Amino acid sequence: MSETPELPDEGVSRRNFLVSGTTFAMAGGLAAGYGTFAFLGARFLYQTDDGKKAWMFVTDVESLKEGDSFDYRTPEGAGVTLARKGSGKTAEDFVALSSVCPHLGCQVHWEAQNDRFFCPCHNGAFDAAGEPIAGPPKDANQPLTRFPLKVVGTLLYILVPLNVSTANASCCPSSSRNI
């Protein structure tokens, strides 16, 4: 019986090496791409509040008359409506409330004639302190988010979060309007 002679082991052929290498490179690239996408998506969807807050200048107390309000955008991008409800020069004469209805995220606005914040989406209404008084927000007991204020000399400041990962970093008052 004749035995078949064994051929010497020449290692991996160039073709097999290229096919294997290309397959592993493509799989690694897909894993890295999807992993990066998942990481960034999770950071966007599940943002952490690092607790950093700062007092930001809003306006001079004298420039905002009683009954006036204006929109303010925090560094985080949140809309805030600031209104002057008293004629004094203390923080208690002003109110800073989120301009986003907690019910469905619609824009609320101040109605001086009715002494309330109003959400036109579902006729939601809030009193001057941001407490719900009508519509779905009242049914669900969803007040507007309130931002702390302080007056130093004649300057009004607002305490806002500094997490700027979500949006525009516009922090300055936009348009003034009479209420």
Image (tube, helix red, strand yellow):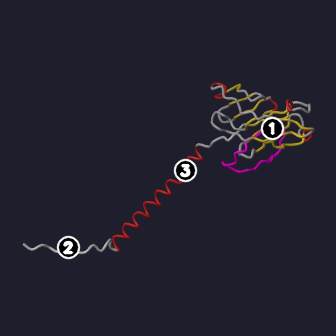
- Identify the element where label 2 is drawn: loop
Q: CA distance from mark 1 to mark 2?
A: 88 Å
Comparing marks 1 and 3, which lies closer to the viewer?
3
Q: Which residues are magenta?
A: 158-179
Q: CA distance from mark 1 to mark 3?
A: 37 Å
Check the image and report above or below for 98 versus 164: above
Q: Which residue is under mark 2?
A: 6
Residue 117 location, quadrant = top right
Q: Which mark is residue 82?
A: 1
- Identify the element where label 1 is drawn: strand
Residue 108: horizontal and vertical position, in percent?
A: 72, 37
Residue 178 location, quadrant = top right
Residue 103: horizontal and vertical position, in percent?
A: 64, 33
- Identify the element where label 3 is drawn: helix
Magenta: predominant secondary structure element?
Answer: loop
Q: Which residue is under mark 3?
A: 39
Identify which residue is drawn at 77% across, 47% down.
171
Identify which residue is drawn at 84% across, 33% down.
94
Residue 149 location, quadrant = top right
Whether pointer 1 and pointer 3 mark residues with C-beta atoms closer than 8 Å, the reply is no
Three-letter amino acid code at the position of disc 3: Phe
Three-letter amino acid code at the position of disc 1: Leu
Residue 177: horizontal and vertical position, in percent?
A: 83, 42
Query: In this view, which residue lies farthest toward the left?
Result: 1
Residue 112: horizontal and vertical position, in percent?
A: 82, 32
Comparing marks 2 and 3, which lies closer to the viewer?
2
**Between residues 132 and 91, which one lies in front from this camera angle?**
91
**Between residues 20 and 114, which one lies in front from this camera angle?**
20
